[in-house]
Amino acid sequence: MAKTLFDKIWERNLVTPETEDRPAILHIGLHLIHEVTSPQAFTVLKERGLNVRRPDLTLGTIDHSVPTLPARADGRLPYVTAQAEMQVETLRKNCQEQGIPLLDLDDERRGIVHVVGPELGRTRPGIVIVCGDSHTSTHGAFGALAFGIGTTEVGHVLATQSLLQRRPRTMRVTFEGELPDGVGGKDMALAMIAKLGTQGGTGYVIEYQGKAVRQLTMEGRMTLCNMSIEGGARAGMVAPDEVTWAYLEKAAGISLDRDEDLVSDEGAVFDKEIVIDAASLTPMVTYGTSPDAASAANGNVPDAEEGLDYMGFVAGHPLAEYPVNKVFVGSCTNGRIEDMRATARVLTGRKVAEGVLMLIVPGSEAVKRQAEEEGLDQVFAAAGAEWREPGCSMCIAMNGDKGEPGELVVSTSNRNFKGRQGEGVRTVLASPLTAAASAVAGRIADPREYL
C-alpha cells in the first residue's frame, strides 16, 4: 500500500499503537526547550523525584525574554522585567541540574529555538521533534514530524522521551509552477492560509509539494512550514531532497546517509488536497487581525467582517495608502541569513523613511556573524535601521521590543493578533522584501517596485 511521508515517519517512531481508549505513544528524537514554557515542567519533575530521561536528546536555548540591546556599562543586560531575567536564570539552573546542553547567552551558537536546531544539524529527517512552542512546525522543512506541545507535555517528554498522540489526518498542498521574482516562502504561506482559513488545517499534518516548493531554499521551506500552525495544522513538512541533505551536512559537518525512502509514494492517498498556482502569486500582506486576513500588497483592502476597525483600514482603499510607524525584520519565521540578504537587497542605497523605526533582529548568533561578514549590517546602518542582538524581539514583545498603542507595524513575524506586538498595536504580516520596501516608502509597499 502506498504511504505518505507522514505515514512513514509515524510508523518509524511509533512505540505503541493507539486504540479507541488510548492515544499512540511516539518516541521523541529531539526535544527543544526555552526559558518561557519549561519552568513549570521542571518543577513537576522535581516534585515527583524524576530526572530527565535523555538529556542528550534535549537542547535548551534562550530566546523569548532576552533583550536585543547590548549589555549596559555595568555588564548587565537590560531585561525588561525582573521576571524575564528570572526565567533565563531558572532555565540555566534547571539545565545544569539535569545535565541538559544549554546554548547560554555567551554561547556563539545561541539563538531562537527554531533557528538554532537546523543550524546545528540537530534537526534531522524522519524523527519526531517537539518543543513548548507552536512554531516547532518549522523543523518539518527537513522531513521531520515537528509540532508544538503544552507545558504538561513538556514535562512528560522530559521524564519519558515519549509522547501520547492521536494520529492526525494528512493534507497535501501543491504549489504548481514557478514563483515570480519578489515572491517567496512567506507569500506562499500567507496565500495558503488565506485560502485555507485559520481553522482549515485543524487535525491535519500538511505535506508541501510542487515545483515552487522544490525551488525554495531551506530557509524558504522553513518559513513555509513555520506558518503551518497559523492555518490550524498540527505540522507541516517537505520531503528531504538534495537541498536538504546538503544543508544538513554543512550544518552538522559530517556526511549523512541519504534516506531515499522519506518521500510520499506515488499513489499515496491524502485525506485532503489543495492546489495553488504559484506563478500567479504576488507579495502578500495581512489587513486584519488573523493570519488568514491576507491580500496582495498592491491591492485594495478587502471587505471583511472582523479586524478592519481595529486596524483602522477601510474596505476598498489601497493598502499602499496606509502609513507605517515601525518595521520589524526577524523572528523564527524570517530571522535567517536569507531574510537578512533580502532585506539588504531593498535597503542598499536607500534610506528608511523619516519617522519610521526599523528593527532588524537576527535569529541567531550565527546569522548575526554571517550577516556582518557579508557587510549587511553596514547596509542596514547606512539606511538608518537598527541592527540588534539575536532574539524573538517584537514577534511576541516579551522582551520590551514593541510598538506603541495605535502604531502600524509591518512585521516578518507570524501572528497579527490584537496586542501581539504591544497593547493597541496594529500588525501587518509580510515578507522581508515587503517589510523593507514598506520601511523605505513609509507606507505599505509592493517590494517589486524596489527590485
Image (spheres, grey):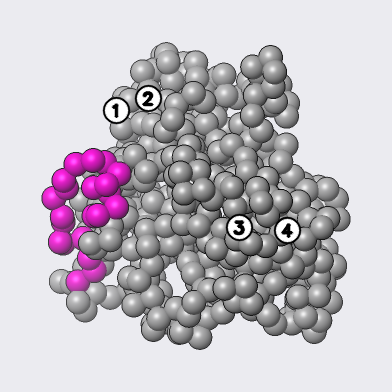
Residue at 23% in and 62% down: 242
User: Which residue carries the number 3 mark?
Assistant: 412
Q: Rounded to the nearest whole Å, what is the CA distance between mark 2 and mark 3? A: 30 Å
Residue 293 visible from this viewpoint: no
- How crowded pointer 1 is (Cα within 10 Å; few <14, some 14-19, many 20+) is rated as few
User: Mark 2 is on which residue type?
Assistant: Pro
User: Which residue carries the number 1 mark?
Assistant: 56
Cβ atoms under marks 2 and 3 closer than 8 Å:
no
- How would you classify the magenta stretch by its main secondary structure? loop
Residue 293 appears at what percent x and percent y?
67, 71
Q: Earlier in the sequence, mark 3 or mark 1?
A: 1
Q: Is residue 309 above or below residue 276?
A: above
User: Mark 1 is on which residue type?
Assistant: Asp
Q: Earlier in the sequence, mark 2 or mark 1?
A: 1
Cβ atoms under marks 4 and 2 closer than 8 Å:
no
User: Which residue carries the number 2 mark?
Assistant: 101
Q: Rounded to the nearest whole Å, what is the CA distance between mark 3 and mark 1? A: 33 Å
Q: Earlier in the sequence, mark 4 or mark 2?
A: 2
Residue at 72% in and 36% down: 400
